[in-house]
Amino acid sequence: MANLKDLAQHLGLSQATVSRALNDYPTINAETKKKVLEAANLLNYRPNSSARRLATGKAGAFGLVLPVTDNLLTDPHFVDFLGGFTEALAAEDLDVVLTASDNPQTYKRYAESGKVDGLVLSNPKIDDIRVQILSEMQFPFVVHGRTSGPAQYAFYDIDNHGAFLTATRHLLDLGHRRIALLNGTTDAMFARSRFEGYRDALAAHDIKVDSALVFNAQMTEEQGYTHTRILCAHDQRPTAILCSSALMTLGVSRRLREEKLQMGRDISVISHDDGLSSLKTENFSVPLSVTRAPIREAGTEIAGMLISRINGTAISDLQHVRKAELILRASTSTAPV
Amino acid sequence: MANLKDLAQHLGLSQATVSRALNDYPTINAETKKKVLEAANLLNYRPNSSARRLATGKAGAFGLVLPVTDNLLTDPHFVDFLGGFTEALAAEDLDVVLTASDNPQTYKRYAESGKVDGLVLSNPKIDDIRVQILSEMQFPFVVHGRTSGPAQYAFYDIDNHGAFLTATRHLLDLGHRRIALLNGTTDAMFARSRFEGYRDALAAHDIKVDSALVFNAQMTEEQGYTHTRILCAHDQRPTAILCSSALMTLGVSRRLREEKLQMGRDISVISHDDGLSSLKTENFSVPLSVTRAPIREAGTEIAGMLISRINGTAISDLQHVRKAELILRASTSTAPV
DNA sequence: CTGTGTATTGAAAGCGCTTTCAAGAATTGG
DNA sequence: CCAATTCTTGAAAGCGCTTTCAATACACAG
C-alpha cells in the first residue's frame, strides 16, 4: 500500500504539496494537482484514515449505541432508520460506528475516545439520563425522539401527541366511545406522548381513560394478537383500536379475524405507520387507516442535523418536530349503534 | 481532556511507562501500575483511538457495507443479525462501522482505508464479485452465507440445501405431491440452495419441478399474500407450501384465511424461521412447522470468526455450515386424499 | 533596476499513541 | 564485594497525515 510519502517521492514533490493537491486546497497549481491525482490513481493511493483523523482531530464518523437488553436490536423499525441514516452519511463520506451497551457511561467513553464526531441517541426514555450526560459534556448529539428532562438538546421527533390526538378525535367524530390503545412500553417517551394525545382527545369529549382499554407492550405481532384477544373478551369490547405499530396491528388483525370481527365494519382500527418497506399498511387485507411518518426519513434528517451541529448550528435551530399525516382507508368507519 | 502526556507529567513518569501500565505490559512494577490506573481514573483519561490506531496499525473495528438499493436495509432479518454481531464485538471492545454503497469498489476502498480490520459480507449473490475482490486483496473477511465462485473464503452459512431438502422430503412423506415454494429473489445464493434442496427431494420421488409452483420474490408479508392468492387460483392448487421467511408466511397465512383454507388441515405449510424475536412462529394462530436457524447466532458466530481470522486462523478452519432443525408443529399434516 | 505583490512549493512541527533500544537500579550468586 | 542477572523505566523514533510558516520564483509597477 502506497502512502503519502511514497506518492510524494514518486512525484518528486513534498508531502505537503501532495496533501494539498489531494484535499482541494486553493493555492495549488492546476497542473500539479492534475499530476498528483493521476499518480494517486496509478499507485492506488488511499489516505490512511487513522492518520488523517489524528492530524485533523475529526473522526469522520457518527456513533450509535445499541441497547443490549432493549428491543432496539430486534425492532424492525430500527433497520429502516439505520438505512436512512447510513445512506445519508455515506453520501458525505461519513461512516457510522455501532457499539452495543446498556451502560450510559458508554456514551461518555465513546464521545471521549475520539472515535466519533457526534452521536445519535435512539429510543429515548422518559427523563433520559444519556441526554443529560452528553449535554454536560457538550458533545454533539441528536436525539431521535424526545425526552422529558430540562436539558436543551437537538432532536428530531414526530408529533406523537398530535398524531394520536388527531386519530383519537377522528374516531370520536365517527361516534366511537370505547377506544382502546395498544401502545409501546411505558418507559418509552413516544409511548407517553401518544398516550397523552389519546387522553387529551378523550378529555375534550369528557371521557376518562379506561385503564382496561390501554395496554403497554413490546410492539410485536404477538402482543397485538394477545391484547386484542383480551380486549375482545371484555363485557363491553371496544369499538375501535388505536395501535402504535403496523407489526403489532398485524397481530390485531389476525385476532380480529378469529373473533369474526371485520375491520372497518365491526371494529375500527387506526395504526401508526412508520413507512416500513417490508410492511405496507395500504396492502393489508383491509387497507389500514394510519397516522403516517416514515422512520427512514428520520434517519436521513438526523444525519443532516448531526452534520449541521458539528458545523456550529445552534441547538435551538435543530429541534424538529415532524407532523404525521392521518391517512384514512378502509379500517375505520362510524361506530355501530 | 487529559492525554497521555498530561497523565505522564502528572505522575512524574514517562509516557512509555504510563502506556505500558495502561496496556497490561508484564514488565511493569505492580505499584507503579496501580498508581497509573488511579491517576488515569482521576484525570478521566481516555486514550485517543485515532492515535492508538495509527500507532498500532489496528483499527479495532469491523466493517459492514449496506447495499443501498437492495432489500438488506429494509430486511427485518438484518437487524437481528446486526444485534448479534455488534454485541459480540462490543464484548471484545471492538466496534462495527457501517457504510452504504452498491459499488463493489467501496469494499476495496474500505479495506484499504484502514478504517476496519476486516469485513463481513452480507447477502451474497450467486458468483459474488465482492468475494473475489476481497480475496485478491487478501483482506480478512467472512461471508454470511455462501457464493458459487471458485474462491476459497471464510463463511458462516446455514445448510439451506439440507433444510429445504428435509422439509420437502417430510412433506412428500406425508403424501404431498403438489408442493409450492415461495422463495427469495433469484440472485440470492440462499434462494438457489433452498431451491436445489427442494428440487432434489422431489427428484428422489421422480417428481419434476412445476415452475407454476415456484416463486421468487422479496420476502415481505405482501408477497406472501399475493403469491398465495395466485397459487390458490390454480386449477390444481398445491396441497403444501414451503416458504422462505416467517414474515412472508404471515402473508401466506392471511391469504389462506381469506381462501377459507385452514393451515395444517386443508393445506400444509413449512416456513423457514430465522428466529426473529419480533415474530415467533410458535405463536402463529396455527403454530408453524419450520426449519429453524436463528440469524442472531450468525451475527455472534461471524464476529468470533472475524476475530479468529485476523489472529491468523486459516480460512479452511473458518467455513461453518450450521444445520437447521426441522420443527414440526400444527401447520403440517398428511395430504388430503 | 528596485520594490511590492502574488502564486506556488517545501521544511518541519505536530496530532497522541506504541514500541524498540538502552540504561539505570536492584538483586543474586560466588 | 564484584560480576552477572533480572526488573523497571526513559528517550526517542515513528505511525501517516495536516498545516503553519517561510522561502522561492515570477510578474509587474514605479
Image (tube, coloured by chain):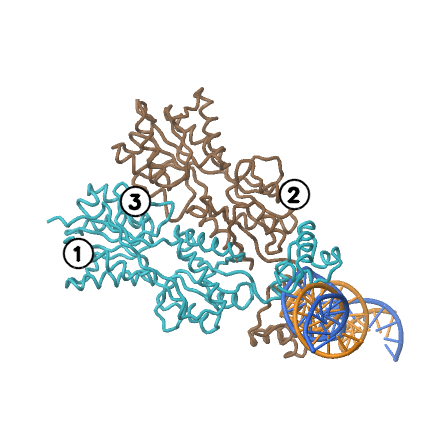
Chain colours: A cyan, B brown, C orange, D blue
Image x and y of residue A27, in percent: 64, 65
Residue topped by disc 3: A282
Q: Secondary structure at mark 2?
A: helix
The circle on residue B36 is none
Q: Secondary structure at mark 3?
A: helix
The relative height of residue C9 versus residue B65 in the rendered view (above or below) is below
Residue topped by disc 2: B136
Q: Quadrant of residue A148?
A: bottom left
Amino acid type, callout 1? Leu
Image x and y of residue A215, in percent: 26, 56
Image x and y of residue A243, in percent: 27, 53
The relative height of residue B108 versus residue A123 in the rendered view (above or below) is above
**Apparent side of residue A298 relative to residue B10 in the rendered image (left or right):** left
Pointers 2 and 3 in contact (CB under 8 A)? Answer: no
Give the chain of mark 1: A
Report whether residue B15 is seen. no
In the rendered image, the residue lying farthest to the left is A337
- Mark 2 neighbour density, 10 Å: few (under 14) some (14–19) many (20 or more): few
Amino acid type, callout 3? Glu
Residue situated in front as seen by the camera: B75 or A8: A8
Pointers 2 and 1 in contact (CB under 8 A)? Answer: no
**Apparent side of residue A216 relative to residue B118 in the rendered image (left or right):** left
Alpha carbon distance from label 2 to label 1: 65 Å
Give the chain of mark 3: A
Q: Earlier in the sequence, mark 1 or mark 3?
A: 1
Amino acid type, callout 2? Glu
Q: Secondary structure at mark 1?
A: helix
Residue situated in front as seen by the camera: B236 or C8: C8
Residue topped by disc 1: A172
